[in-house]
Amino acid sequence: MIKRLIDQVADAIASRTSAEAGTEGHEAALRMATAVLMVEVARADHVFDESEFDRLLSLIEAHFELSPEEAAELVNAASDKAENLTSVHDFTQRLHESLDEADKARIIALLWQIAYADGRLDKYEDSLVLKISDLLYVSRGRVMRLKHDAQHAARQAR
């Protein structure tokens, strides 16, 4: 009887711990997917300069509420993943299945901010952000508003 009670308590603790670990793993996967997409947009024009890198770090730090060291680790890991990337589909699919419409729009806003980080929008950056927004099923009207907002913010920063 006591052994069965101890086993039940142990099982309850183990399931709670694995559920928490599962949630943390899920959140880490979403952070990684977002960071990989951000790195891909930064690299889309084949120029990943210091202004884009700094903007990428600050956006990741702010968006995910990470320390500068944690943000740098995430960017480095995402950069490694992006190095051999052939398609963004796996990352967008994970985000699409896990996020609501507002969170998806926030990601698109981040991508536009990365695209405009160097003060100009390259056609490859533009194309990639539009492709990602389509894969996330964010309405084109909302995407264009977010693009306009990022463009306006980039002009104000100059």
Image (cartoon, rainbow, N blue to C red):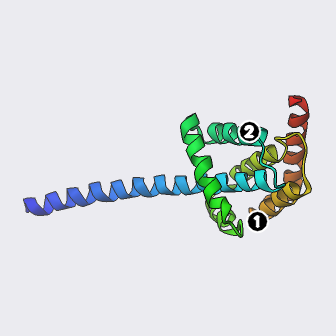
Marks 1 and 2, how far apart at CA = 24 Å
Q: Are marks 1 and 2 in contact (CB under 8 Å)?
A: no
User: Is residue 113 shown above or below 25?
Assistant: above
- Residue 98: x %, y % from top left: 61, 60
User: Is residue 130 shown above or below 73?
Assistant: below
Front-most of residues 30 and 123: 123
- Residue 106: x %, y % from top left: 73, 47
Report whether residue 19 is seen.
yes
As drawn, the label of residue 135 is 1
- Residue 121: x %, y % from top left: 90, 48
Residue at the spot of label 2: 55
- Please tell me whether mark 1 sits on a helix, a strand or a loop: helix
- Give the residue type that dot 2 points to: Arg
Q: Residue at x 77, y 48 (%)?
A: 48
Front-most of residues 10 and 116: 116
As drawn, the label of residue 27 is none
- Give the residue type that dot 1 points to: Leu
Query: In this rendering, which labeled residue sits more in front, label 1 or label 2?
Result: 2
Q: Residue at x 81, y 41 (%)?
A: 117
The number of numbered badges drawn on the structure is: 2
Crowd rating for badge 1 (residues with CA inside 10 Å; few <14, some 14–19, many 20+): some
Crowd rating for badge 2 (residues with CA inside 10 Å; few <14, some 14–19, many 20+): some
N-terminal of the pair, mark 1 or mark 2, is 2
User: Which quarter of the rendered picture does the C terminus lie within?
Assistant: top right
